Amino acid sequence: MLILGESHYDLPEREVPEYTCKWVRDYAEHGKTNRFFTVVTKLFLGLPNGSSPSSDERSAFWQRVAFHNYIQSFPGERARLRPTAAMWADAARCLPRVLERLEPEFVLVLGKALNEHLPVWTCGAIVCVTPHPSSFGFRHTQWGARVRESLRSRTSRRDIGP
């Protein structure tokens, strides 16, 4: 499984090639808490409202999936700053190599804007798109059911309708 995010945001001096790998290890695998990792884990585990995965559950989940940010550089220091046209173009050239290397059977695309910028690919994976977990009104129970249905159905989804 590949979880496809849009980008990271941080200070320019912190931008290094290993940023995403370190971020995933620190927050997902090594017990630091972060709403993003908790919500994404809940999408797959089907946990009810008001409950959270244990540190061990979260760590086990993130050790079994791949995570890739589509945009390979920081659009800015804080969320809600949009990537430039050049960043989107660079990312479109990178994604086919990522898909070829990982050969995912399932891709979860996190975000409407990201989905609108994705090129059409033919890697044979099931594609499920949700709003970004930090978007207003995001409900993990609603979108988690959609993610799990897509995993079970083995049919491609590139829509975000109800």
Image: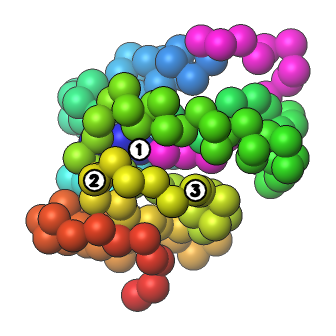
- How far from the left and from the top, in percent, is residue 105? 23, 47
Under mark 3, the amino acid is Pro
Tell me if residue 63 comes above or below residue 5 in the rendering. above
Query: Which residue is the site of mark 2?
Result: 124
Q: Residues within 10 Å of mark 3 (few under 14, many from 20)?
A: few
Under mark 2, the amino acid is Gly
Q: In this rendering, would 155 be left or right of 24?
A: left
Front residue of 5 and 98: 98
Q: Is residue 30 visible?
A: yes
Task: Give the CA separation, mark 3 to mark 1.
Answer: 16 Å
Tell me if residue 81 comes above or below residue 98 in the rendering. below
Tell me if residue 44 comes above or below residue 75 in the rendering. below
Query: Which residue is the site of mark 1?
Result: 3
Pick whichever of labels 3 and 2 is earlier in the sequence.
Answer: 3
Q: Which mark is residue 54?
A: none
Give the secondary structure at mark 2.
loop
User: Could you tell me which residue is drawn at 76 percent across and 17 percent down?
Assistant: 15
Tell me if residue 110 comes above or below residue 142 in the rendering. above
Nearer the viewer's eye, disc 2 or disc 1? 2
Q: Residues within 10 Å of mark 2 (few under 14, many from 20)?
A: few
Give the secondary structure at mark 3.
loop
Secondary structure mostly seen in magenta is loop
Residue furthest bottom as drawn: 162
Task: Give the CA separation, mark 3 to mark 2.
Answer: 14 Å
Q: Which mark is residue 119?
A: 3
Nearer the viewer's eye, disc 3 or disc 1? 3
Q: Residues within 10 Å of mark 1 (few under 14, many from 20)?
A: some
Number of numbered tags placed on the structure image: 3
Q: Which residues are magenta?
A: 4-18
Q: Quadrant of the C terminus?
A: bottom left
Under mark 1, the amino acid is Ile
